[in-house]
Amino acid sequence: MLPTWIFQRGGEQLMLHCRETGRGVTLVVSGDDDLRSYSFRDFAALVKFESEMADFLVGTGWVPARLTVESGVPPAIPRSVPAPTNPPGQTRRQLPGRPGC
């Protein structure tokens, strides 16, 4: 399962994408012409890092906007990040929580 999370704030967009590597898993964070990657040997360390990053993003005004998963298995998602609200007159599927590969 390789999830990609999209967070939005105003006109900005931030994408968090997990990739499996030969040495573990890497979280690639991209947005505003900036690209960063964080590598983890231990899956639990990645999930903890993502959880803390999601808390920080939500605390600074970012809203989880979309989740895609490359395999048919949904990622494990802790519940502390609120789902985004729908703009008036629009409907959209709510996200169940925050990133987790």
Image (cartoon, helix red, strand yellow):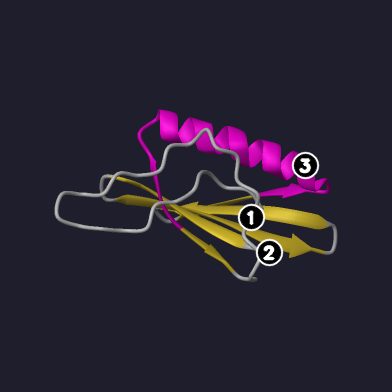
Q: Say which amino acid is labelled 3.
A: Ala
Q: Do the residues under discs 2 and 1 have CB atoms within 8 angstroms? A: yes
Q: Say which amino acid is labelled 2.
A: Met
Q: Residues within 10 Å of mark 2 (few under 14, many from 20)?
A: some
Instruction: Judge left or right: residue 83 versus residue 25.
Output: left
Disc tally is: 3
Identify the residue at the far left of this view.
Answer: 89
Numbered circle sitting on residue 31: none
Circle 1 sits on which residue? 75
- Expressed as whole percent of the image width and height from the top left, the position of residue 78 reads 60, 39
Circle 2 sits on which residue? 1
- Expressed as whole percent of the image width and height from the top left, the position of residue 75 reads 64, 55
Query: Is 54 one of the magenta-colored residues?
Result: yes
Q: Do the residues under discs 1 and 3 have CB atoms within 8 angstroms? A: no
The residue closer to the viewer here, 9 or 70, is: 70
Give the CA separation, mark 1 to mark 3. 13 Å
Span shown in magenta: 38-66
Secondary structure beneath label 2: loop
Query: Is 80 one of the magenta-colored residues?
Result: no
Circle 3 sits on which residue? 44
Secondary structure beneath label 1: loop
Instruction: Judge left or right: residue 47 versus residue 56.
Output: right
For the point 49% across and 31% down, the residue is: 56
Q: Residues within 10 Å of mark 1 (few under 14, many from 20)?
A: some
Q: Earlier in the sequence, mark 1 or mark 3?
A: 3
The residue closer to the viewer here, 78 or 20, is: 78
Q: Nearer the viewer, mark 1 or mark 3?
A: 1
The residue closer to the viewer here, 29 or 46, is: 46
Q: Earlier in the sequence, mark 2 or mark 3?
A: 2
For the point 69% across and 43% down, the residue is: 47
Q: Say which amino acid is labelled 1.
A: Pro
Q: Quadrant of the N terminus?
A: bottom right
